[in-house]
Image: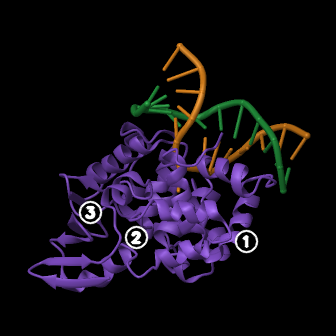
Chain colours: A purple, B orange, C green
Amino acid sequence: MRISYQAGEVSVRDVAFDAQLTLIDSAQVFHWKKEGAERYSCVTAGRHVTLIAEANGFRLSNAASEDIPFWRNYFDLDRDYQAIARACEPYPLAREAVERLPGLRVLNQPAWETLLTFILSANNNVTRIRRLVESLKSVFGTEDDFPTPERLSQISEEQLRAIGCGYRAPYLIQTAAMVRDGFPLESLKDEGYESAHKRLLELPGVGDKVADCVQLFGMGQSEAFPVDVWVERLMKKWFAPDARNKREMRAAAHEMFGENAGIVQQYLFHCARLGLISLE
DNA sequence: AACCAGGGTGAGC
DNA sequence: GCTCACCATGGT
């Protein structure tokens, strides 16, 4: 992997990256927009950026040189995905899943954005989550960012229901108020997985699954193993047929995949959604 | 027209 | 501890 900078563009070469898969279809991030065949744009962490997909990597236009470390982390460029595939060797189905979707990467998003979007994701479908996140950002955020906890905590339930949040509206408001009042969202990244998980469960609208998504996609805790309906079916059929509930499925995943559990999960999840793995 | 979606909550055991 | 009805909304 090589990163270079020239004339306002960050260029990333020699890296497996499938922009359509990772930014649009993977259901880990909901606010990238497709602008053209190879062009994608996004507002994240107060940065407005355009990504141009290339043969063996990508370019970021409108990027500052001092933001290279930010994007390096955001796109998970320092993780060795082939090594993860190899580490799955005892579990051929998992290894095949990782190898069948080259270029799918697990992004490291800002924690607050991840928390917001996954509260909205509960019992919802991807198309509608994307619309909802876009509305939340454009109606209540600024041109360059999502609404802050301060701002969101002062929006009325009626206003949030008006853009389609439904019963998740009070969860958003109450969680925003807790973060505003000092809930240590950022410092949870430095706690262990279990400890951070328990703290996240204190937030309204956050259960085991949403907490794991925030930890995996927004806190860099790769052992987090979100169990949604797809992963539940996968685990029941292929990996942990005796698990009696989702908590036991998570434990089984930690046993099998350790610190790579969340990364493997993302590949399995997507293969299942694409129909590449039979769930009978 | 039913059924589903990257589920969480609270009540009743 | 556990199960389960209920929760808005729109996609398929």
Q: Separation of disc 2 and disc 1 at Cα?
A: 28 Å
Tell me whether circle 2 and circle 3 mark residues in contact (CB < 8 Å). no
Specify the subunit that label 3 lies on.
A
Tell me whether circle 1 and circle 3 mark residues in contact (CB < 8 Å). no
**Earlier-in-chain disc, 2 versus 1:** 2
Residue B11 left/right relative to A75? right
**Earlier-in-chain disc, 2 versus 3:** 3
The quarter of the picture where residue A1 lies is: bottom left
Instruction: Say which residue appears at 58% left-offset and 62% top-offset.
Output: A211
Q: Which residue is mark 3?
A: A43
Q: Which residue is mark 2?
A: A110
Closest to the observer: A150 or A80? A80
How packed mark 2 is, by other alpha carbons closer than 10 Å (few <14, some 14-19, many 20 or more), is some
Do the residues at discs 1 and 3 belong to one chain? Answer: yes
Of the two numbered discs 2 and 1 in the rendering, the one whose residue sits closer to the viewer = 1
Query: What is the three-letter code of the residue carrying label 2?
Result: Pro
Q: Separation of disc 1 and disc 3 at Cα?
A: 37 Å
Q: Is residue A147 visible?
A: yes
Q: Which residue is mark 1?
A: A255
Residue A244 left/right relative to A59? right
Do the residues at discs 2 and 3 belong to one chain? Answer: yes
What secondary structure is marked by label 3? Answer: strand
Closest to the observer: A148 or A2? A2
Specify the subunit that label 2 lies on.
A
Tell me the number on the disc at residue A171: none
